[in-house]
Amino acid sequence: MKSRYYDLQHIKEIPIGDYLHACGIEPAKRYNGYALYHAPYREDPNASLKVDFRQNLWHDYGTSQGGSIIDLVMRMQGCSAYEAMAHLAEGKATTLAPFPFHREARIEQKRKEQRPSNTRRILSISEELPLHLQNYLREVRKIDLAVASPYLRHIRYEVGGREYSAIGFANCAGGYELRDDKTFKGTIAQKDISVVAGETNNSPLCIFEGFMDFLSYLTMKGKESISPSIVLNSVSNLPRAVAYLHEKGSDSVRAFFDNDEAGRQALQGIQSSGIKVEDMSQYYARYKDLNEYHVAQRTELKQVIPPRKRGLRR
């Protein structure tokens, strides 16, 4: 059977936003010229799918995938490029029902609501950390509690009837990023970025992956004034951080990201949004992240992790 010819350029001009609307998929948040969606082809509580209405392109910050409407349909439908073009050219988007993923997700959510809850529930929030968490920050992470304590809370919570205790770092959604003195990292309530106002308005905004890196920065600065800062709390929150930067009119930032693939992709994600980025990870290139660098500088065991000659204070 002879394949049908489709006008590729014409198909690529079909607005992605219109297509998603026809599929019953609406933005989680709208901005000037673009919007953030919950990716319809995977679980995406952070709304990591950016659709640029001006360029008619999409990018998923959670998977680092993106492209034209054809690429999106291929991802959503699990089909070939030719099948995606046929799907779009024949106008199936206008009559397409919401994708099975959404129906299955809603069914699964109802099932979860009917099960015994394993959700973290806050028991209490207090300003003073217990001794074991103080020791963890001071001895293991080399954090100066004199400067860090105002940003931290002691969170007591329960899961499935069992009680736990953790360091809490507030985010913009009213939730807390959690860390204990062992290996646990998590979130209570909704996950989001954290924003710190800072004390110097004429310096570039600083952006960190996790709050332990931010606390390391605080400790390095000591009594010096700090710059306004954003803590991602997860690289999947990058679209929210970029949206915040655009809303505030920030055209340049200093990024203290991890020296791994996720950190490099986050750096590229900010750069691709048109914001100038100073990559501060160059100053701790031999280390996993800023905290590891900081610990190496504070410990006497420098032969284990040789320190770099250049410091981070600027």
Image (tube, rainbow, N blue to C red):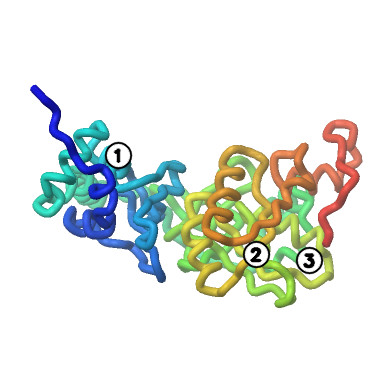
Q: Counting other residues with Cα less than 10 Å from the Cα at mark 1, is it few (<14), some (14-19), or many (20 or more)?
A: some
Q: Which of 17 and 136 is in front in this view?
A: 17
Residue position for label 1: 75
- The percent position of residue 88, horizontal first and vertical second, equals 18, 45
Q: Is disc 2 placed on a helix, strand or loop?
A: strand
Q: Type of residue at label 2? A: Ser
Residue drawn at 22 percent across, 59 percent down: 18
Residue 199 appears left or right of 11: right
Judged by depth in the image, the label closer to the viewer, 1 or 3, is 1
- Residue highlighted by disc 2: 252
Location of mark 3 (residue):
146
Residue at mark 2 to residue at mark 3: CA–CA distance: 30 Å
Report the amino acid beneath label 1. Arg
> Label for residue 150?
none
Q: What residue type is labelled 3?
A: Ala
Residue plotted at (66% across, 62% down)? 253
Q: Alpha-carbon distance for marks 1 and 3?
A: 50 Å
Front one among 56 and 233: 56
**Which percent across, then down, holds residue 164?**
52, 51
Between discs 1 and 3, the one toward the N terminus: 1
* Dot placed on the residue nearer the N-terminal end, 1 or 2: 1
